[in-house]
Image (cartoon, rainbow, N blue to C red):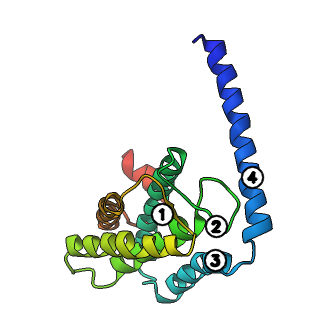
C-alpha cells in the first residue's frame, strides 16, 4: 500500500466512523433519551460529584483530585481503546458519543477512588485497591450490564479487576507525592541564586 492509498483508506474509515456515530446519536436521541436508564446515567454523572463536594477533605482536596483526574484520564484512554477494538460497548449513554461513557469513567470511578484515598488514609492501600477493583469489576460493571449501560463483548471481568486495582494503586502513589507544596512567588529567584 502506498502512502496515498493509506490516506485514502483513512478517509474511507473516517466516513464509516462518522456514519456509525450518526447511528448512535439517532439511537440515543430517539430510543434512549429520558428512559429510566438514561436518568440513571445522569444520576451517576451528578451524584458522585455532589457527594465529593460535600465530603471532601478541603485541606487535601487538590492533592486527592489530581489522583482522581489521573484515574479519569487513564480510564478514558483505556476505555476508548476497548470500545475501538470491540471489547465492550455502551448501548445507553448520557451523551451521544460512540466511545465515551461519561457517567462511569468521569464520575463514579474517580470519585470512588478519591473517597477511598481520603478516608482511613493509613489503611493498607493494597487492600483498598483490591476492594476497589473487586467491587468495581465484579459488582459495578455487571450491574451496569444488567441495566444496558455496559455491554461486555470480548472481555473478562477479571481483566477489569486487575486494571482497576492498578488504577487505585497509581492514584494512591500520586496522592502521596511530596511535590504538592505551595507555589512560591519567588520561585525563579530561588532556583537561580
The residue wearing badge 4 is 23
Instruction: Identify the mark at residue 92; answer none if there is no mark.
Output: 2
Answer with mark 3 or mark 1, whichever residue precedes in sequence.
Answer: 3
The residue wearing badge 1 is 69
Among the 4 quarters of the image, the one containing residue 63: bottom left
Q: Residues within 10 Å of mark 1 (few under 14, many from 20)?
A: some
Which element type, helix, strand or loop, lies under badge 3? Answer: helix
Q: CA distance from mark 2 to mark 3?
A: 7 Å
The residue wearing badge 3 is 37
Q: Residues within 10 Å of mark 3 (few under 14, many from 20)?
A: some
Q: In the rendered view, would you say 139 is above or below 74?
A: below
- The x, y position of residue 100, in whole percent, is 59, 57
Q: CA distance from mark 2 to mark 4?
A: 13 Å
> Which residue is at the front of the view, 189 or 162?
162
User: Do the residues bearing badges 4 and 3 touch, measured as CB atoms within 8 Å?
Assistant: no
User: Do the residues bearing badges 2 and 3 touch, measured as CB atoms within 8 Å?
Assistant: yes
- The x, y position of residue 166, in whole percent, is 30, 60
Which element type, helix, strand or loop, lies under badge 4? Answer: helix
Amino acid at each position: 500500500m502506498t502512502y496515498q492509498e493509506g490516506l485514502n483508506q483513512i478517509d474511507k474509515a473516517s466516513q464509516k466512523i462518522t456514519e456509525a456515530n450518526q447511528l448512535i446519536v439517532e439511537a440515543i436521541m430517539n430510543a434512549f433519551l429520558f428512559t429510566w436508564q438514561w436518568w440513571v446515567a445522569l444520576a451517576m454523572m451528578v451524584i458522585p460529584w455532589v457527594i465529593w463536594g460535600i465530603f471532601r477533605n478541603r485541606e487535601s482536596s487538590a492533592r486527592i483530585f489530581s489522583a482522581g483526574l489521573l484515574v479519569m484520564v487513564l480510564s478514558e484512554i483505556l476505555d476508548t481503546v476497548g470500545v475501538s477494538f470491540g471489547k465492550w460497548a455502551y448501548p445507553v449513554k448520557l451523551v451521544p458519543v460512540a466511545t465515551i461513557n461519561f457517567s462511569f469513567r468521569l464520575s463514579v470511578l474517580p470519585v470512588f477512588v478519591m473517597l477511598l484515598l481520603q478516608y482511613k488514609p493509613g489503611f493498607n492501600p493494597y487492600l483498598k485497591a483490591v476492594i476497589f477493583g473487586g467491587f468495581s469489576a465484579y459488582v459495578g460493571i455487571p450491574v451496569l450490564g444488567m441495566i444496558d449501560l455496559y455491554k461486555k463483548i470480548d472481555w473478562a471481568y477479571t481483566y477489569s479487576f486487575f486494571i482497576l486495582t492498578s488504577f487505585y494503586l497509581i492514584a494512591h502513589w500520586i496522592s502521596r507525592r511530596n511535590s504538592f507544596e505551595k507555589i512560591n512567588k519567588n520561585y525563579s529567584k530561588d532556583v537561580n541564586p
